[in-house]
Image (cartoon, helix red, strand yellow):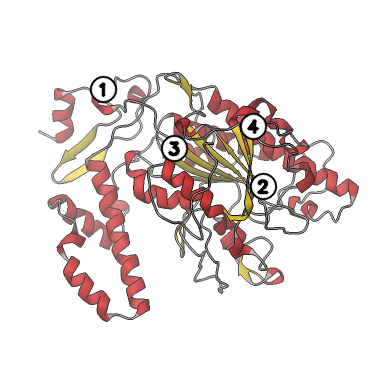
Amino acid sequence: MLAYERIAMSKPLTRRTILQGAGVALSLPWLESIADGAAVSATESLEEPPLRLACLFVPNGVRPDHWTPPGDGANYELTPHLEPLARHKNELLVLENLWNENTVGRNGHWPKVPVWLSGGFVERTTGGDLDSGGTSVDQLLAQRCGDGTPLPSLELGIDSPRSGIDTAGGGFPRALGSFLSWADHNTPVPKEIVPQLAFDRLFRNRRAPVVSSLNPRDRSLVSSLQRDETSLLDVVAEQAKQIRRKGSRTDQARLDEYFESIRAVERRLEASLQPQKRWINKGEFPVDRPAPGTPESHAEHVRLMLDILVLAFWTDSTRIATFMMGDAQSSQDYTFLDGVTETSFHGLSHHREDPARRAQYEQIVTWHVEQFAYFLDCMRSLDEGGASLLDNSMVLYGGSLKDGNQHVEENLPLILAGRGKGSLSPGRRLRAPENTPMCNLHLALMHRMGVKEKSFGDSTGVLRGLDV
């Protein structure tokens, strides 16, 4: 009798059912009968909602005097850029004086993006050997605690990755500014920009590696692991150490990368064989499967991606996500907004204090904040056992430039929304000491997610004051 026949006869199907037989473990794809109300046993569900982290990136800076609020603590006043967040004022921490020192005096845009979540030092290269300076905080979290959900992390975006070297802007590869998430300093994590494909990632063939889709080395590795639960790296650990000691620094780096790729496959397989408990919400967040391709309307594209991100958290498909609302030097056309006549967002960011062009730029920046407010609306509307999805999340919003007109790196425009399951005390303007590393914030968020690193990037300690 086949494994799936035994399962069908012995117990009802659930979202956690794994097909096993002949040394193969395969999770079920998304099935309507399971997704729409199949029973979930108490042993499969967490006792309380998990904590989520989302990082939303916006390009091309802001107008500083329309962003930074007057007033201190809970008595801060909303500025023109922040007005769309009025209904969420008590759920926000407006952060000030954070920056990434490693971006100073270099390119205006491209190398600043990967540093936003890593704090690393981006190297100038010819493009074939990208070096972002470090692993981004979302990916470190995915590596350390992402095995509790079908997707360790979710990366969404709007713009296709760019190629070539920006010779006019310091000689950096444009690809650096096309990716927010980095698995390591050489490896960007592709972002999904097609809504339907992003939606399908939440529900279709999410758990076990599909053996036929792996390269020959990984396919052999999976077969070996399925025969023996012992890690291959544990078996060859001593030999690996000896080889590594004899190698050059370059060889050692290559061996580390190779061994980490093996360990990654092992983790994927282990997660498929031993699925973790997940949080199961009783209500629904209605999102129909999007049509193929990308919407013609930029506004619709952004909203769809935000809806999918909410759905990913609501279904506990992932607890870690990033969304790029534009690449480093986005030239998106915003003439669909009343009063915007020029077709390049990046061009308008360099308004040179011309009143007419500056007004158009301000309108685009504020529109992005409106989308952030919409995202928070959705999260706040969803109840999770007496608290909202927003209460159980930490949502970082902002960018890698303060003043888009002058490429100012200091005092980045940053907002942290949500209550982090009680670990954050929002409703305040929080001023850190001047030139505090943004990585201090990342380290504090990592600790709240259960990853107790002593340092991260160029951190000098955890950011104080998030919980008063």
Q: For marks 2 and 1, give the one nearer the viewer.
A: 2
Quadrant housing the N terminus? top left
Q: How many residues crowd around disc 2 within 10 Å: few (fewer than 14), some, or many (20 or more)? A: many
Which element type, helix, strand or loop, lies under badge 2?
loop
Q: How many residues crowd around disc 1 within 10 Å: few (fewer than 14), some, or many (20 or more)? A: few
Counting from the top left corner in percent of width and height, residue 197 is at 48, 41
Q: Type of residue at label 2?
A: Pro
- Which residue is the site of mark 1? 42
The tag on residue 373 is 4
Counting from the top left corner in percent of width and height, residue 127 is at 55, 70
Of callouts 2 and 1, which one flags the residue occurring earlier in the amino acid sequence? 1
Q: For marks 3 and 1, give the one nearer the viewer.
A: 1
Q: How many residues crowd around disc 3 within 10 Å: few (fewer than 14), some, or many (20 or more)? A: some
Of callouts 3 and 4, which one flags the residue occurring earlier in the amino acid sequence? 3
- Which residue is the site of mark 2? 413
Front residue (pair 438, 273): 438
Of callouts 3 and 1, which one flags the residue occurring earlier in the amino acid sequence? 1
- Which residue is found at the position 30% from the left and 29% from the top? 15
- Which residue is the site of mark 3? 200
The relative height of residue 89 versus residue 344 in the rendered view (above or below) is above
